[in-house]
Image: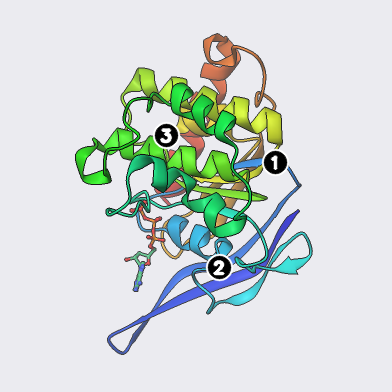
Amino acid sequence: MIRIKDLNVTYKSQGDCYAALRHINLELSAGETCAIIGPSGCGKSTLLKVLAGIIKDFGGSVEINGQPVMPNKQKIGFIPQNYGLLPWKNVYENIRLGIKIKNKNSDDKETLASLLQQLGLAGLESRYPGELSGGQQQRVALARSFLLKPDLLLMDEPFSALDAMTREEIQNVFLTAWRKHSVSTVLVTHDVEEAVYLGRKIVILSASPGTVSKIIDNPLFGVDDIRNHQDFFQLSLTLRRMIKEDWSK
Ligand SMILES: Nc1ncnc2c1ncn2[C@@H]1O[C@H](COP(=O)(O)OP(=O)(O)OP(=O)(O)O)[C@@H](O)[C@H]1O
């Protein structure tokens, strides 16, 4: 369970204070997925960084399973916008980095091989990030997080660099992994359809400073083959209208 109570984040830059997030209240049950959607600069990445324990200076409280955020004790998988790969480590080493840091004895070679296959990375194991496309780097970052089987998975626009078909495939890889391990997940996206497909809860943030304008319980989450159903198009359309109305305020 994730509980965010009256979260406020202010950045200080060159003597000025800048409000990034205001009065954020949000609860996620264990194993739930939550898609965050909001205009550019409204504080989505800031929210993920608070949950990841990277930003520690904030007002209000943030708890993961009743405890404050403690990245050393909790297994938190974080895929930042720049993928967070180490340029001097190859694909194989980058993928194993998370489990290496968290649990030196764990070496799940079978899962790793299957992830390489599912994410279309087989054959690229010895390449370095600088020798990969943006989409390939993004898939390496996903493989690292999926292999870690975190208690909380945070993804900042995780599928943005992928072409439409690969994006759908990798979204399904995510859902399959999620069904198996029920990892609590918060993902930031600019894509309404992605929010409807992957978010059990959909949170719409207002323009900067970000506040929660709407929380939608998504009845279509997890329904088989939902992308081809009329209900999916209808909900996406409704959401798009809500967002347009909200962001034009
Ligand atoms: N380290 C920082 N110091 C000062 N201001 C910052 C810092 N990081 C972010 N900001 C500002 O805080 C606001 C929120 O930034 P954030 O990156 O969280 O937005 P976002 O919603 O993720 O944006 P985008 O959709 O464009 O990625 C922005 O106005 C940004 O300029």
* Residue 154 in the image, given as x and y percentages of width and height: 54, 50
Task: Tell me the amino acid under the disc marked 2.
Answer: Gly
- Badge 2: few (under 14), some or many (20 or more) residues near its Cα, within 10 Å? some
N-terminal label among 1 and 2: 1
Q: Mark 3: which secondary structure?
A: loop
Task: Tell me the amino acid under the disc marked 3.
Answer: Asp
Q: Which residue is painted at 32% across and 40% down in the image?
A: 137
Front-lying residue, 111 or 68: 111
- On the image, numbered disc 1 is attached to which residue? 32
- On the image, numbered disc 3 is attached to which residue? 191
Q: Mark 1: which secondary structure?
A: loop
Q: Mark 2: which secondary structure?
A: loop
Quarter of the figure with residue 71? bottom right
Q: What color scheme is it?
A: rainbow
* Residue 240 in the image, given as x and y percentages of width and height: 46, 32
Front-lying residue, 144 or 216: 144
- On the image, numbered disc 2 is attached to which residue? 53
Determine whether 220 is above or below 138 in the image: above
Single out the residue that lies furthest toward the left: 131
Left or right side of 199 for 41: left
* Residue 228 in the image, given as x and y percentages of width and height: 53, 9
Left or right side of 61 for 37: left
- Badge 1: few (under 14), some or many (20 or more) residues near its Cα, within 10 Å? some
N-terminal label among 3 and 1: 1
Q: CA distance from mark 3 to mark 2?
A: 26 Å
